[in-house]
Amino acid sequence: MMAASIPIEGSAPRLGFLPRAFLLLGRLVLGGVFIFAAYAKLHFDGQWHLHDYYFFFAMSIDSYHLLPLWAVELAARVLPWFEMLLGLMLVLGLWLRWAAAVTSALIAVFCFAIVRAYLLHLEISCGCFGNNERLTGWTIVRDGCFLALSLAVTWLAFIAHRRAARRS
Amino acid sequence: MKARALIAGLLLGVAIVSAMAVPGRTRPAPGGASPSAAQARITPASVTYAKSLGSSSAPVRIEVFSDYQCPQCRSFYLNTLRPVIDNYVSTGKVYLIHHDFPLSMHAYSRDAARWATAAAVVGDFETVDQALYANQDKWEANGQIEPVVAAVLSPAEMKKVKSLFTQDAPELDAVVETDYNLGRAKNIDSTPSIFVTAHGETHELPPGGVSYPLMKQYLDYLLEQH
């Protein structure tokens, strides 16, 4: 009875097949989405914009009227590369718990920004996948799904890690 | 021979007098504007030129598709385009082209575009353009655009503009429609839509307008490359 309710050290079961498959698929999808999001900010109008991507993305971020200019400039310069890094970490499964947690936090911030902009009727670019992607109700639904997926991946990643730690 | 010459002279005289007496479009309009001459000038190409500011050989070209009744266009014009005009267009660095893109949701934006186009034909585009945006809150409620235009033009200029607005409405509409179709061809569905061309490349800026500090940074970057 005790063993059933309080797992003895070393006896914690691995995640089942379905949760493991979901975790794998979820992190691949999320990683792919983040890598694509970074790519779309650096490559548009048929060419790479490694030297001037920042101007276009800064304009997208600024149109939300959320951040001061210095923060807009910083986010515009850093975010695409940070998204690329997170995407690669998710795809490769590196520091998965933390990568997934940071991804969830980032998507939550994005969701807050787009819901606010939508409620304020700002006719702006979402800035999520390129600079001229208009923000609509569909954007909120899509990013909401990404947030749900990211939270699930984060939760499963933490559980998988805890169980692995107990077994070892 | 004398009689023939007399008859011929009489006929010629009658012809000249009747030509001078023909009312309407062939006569010079009050204030010096000739509607027929104006009509001849009202072509999409000539009006686009008249609605442009700066030197066409400037290294950077900005094309703005705008709706006079759209609040974001007003904000973009007053907060971004005015400083751009003062600092970049007037110094020959930027060529600014205005295109009308009146949205169907705005009851008076097409009328405003027609007034601006009439002013452009007469050579007063910048003054009227600025007045329409600056006083948007005055005319958007009731469509009373004429007093706003009259307030910034001399009586003689206003006479010319009004004459064009009333007598050449179809031609003005055709010009506005040409601008609108150009925007549709570029997949525009909202205003302001901004296209920047430099070094042979054209990029559309993100929708919703751009603040002046960021526009300045981008223009300085493009000019540095030049």
Image (cartoon, rainbow, N blue to C red):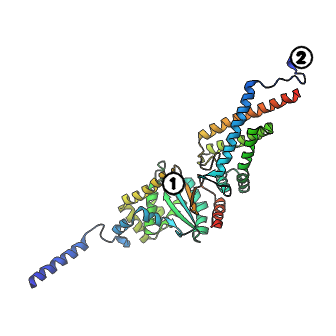
Q: Amino acid at mark 1?
A: Gln
Taking depth in this image into account, of B10 and A108 the one nearest to the observer is A108
Task: Please state the horizontal and vertical placement of residue B23, each as a whole percent of the image.
Answer: 27, 68
Q: Amino acid at mark 2?
A: Met
Q: Are marks 1 and 2 in contact (CB under 8 Å)?
A: no
Image quadrant of residue B174? bottom left
Residue A81, numbered label? none
Task: Please state the horizontal and vertical placement of residue A41, each as a whole percent of the image.
Answer: 66, 50
What chain letter is assigned to the residue under label 2?
A
Query: Mark 1: few, some, or many residues within 10 Å (few <14, many ≥20)?
Result: many
Q: Which residue is mark 2?
A: A2
Q: Is residue A30 above or below residue A80?
A: above
Q: Residue furthest top?
A: A1
* Nearest-to-viewer mark from 1 and 2: 2
| Identity of the residue drawn at 64% across and 58% down | B211
Q: Is residue A116 left or right of residue B69?
A: right
Q: Is residue B221 left or right of residue A157?
A: left
As helix, strand or loop, the secondary structure at mark 1 comes to loop
Real-space Cα distance between discs 1 and 2?
73 Å
Q: Which residue is mark 1?
A: B69
Q: Is residue B111 left or right of residue B25?
A: right
Is residue B114 visible in the rendered image? The answer is yes
What chain letter is assigned to the residue under label 1?
B
Task: Please state the horizontal and vertical placement of residue B129, each as a whole percent of the image.
Answer: 51, 63
Task: Please state the horizontal and vertical placement of residue B152, each as a whole percent of the image.
Answer: 49, 67
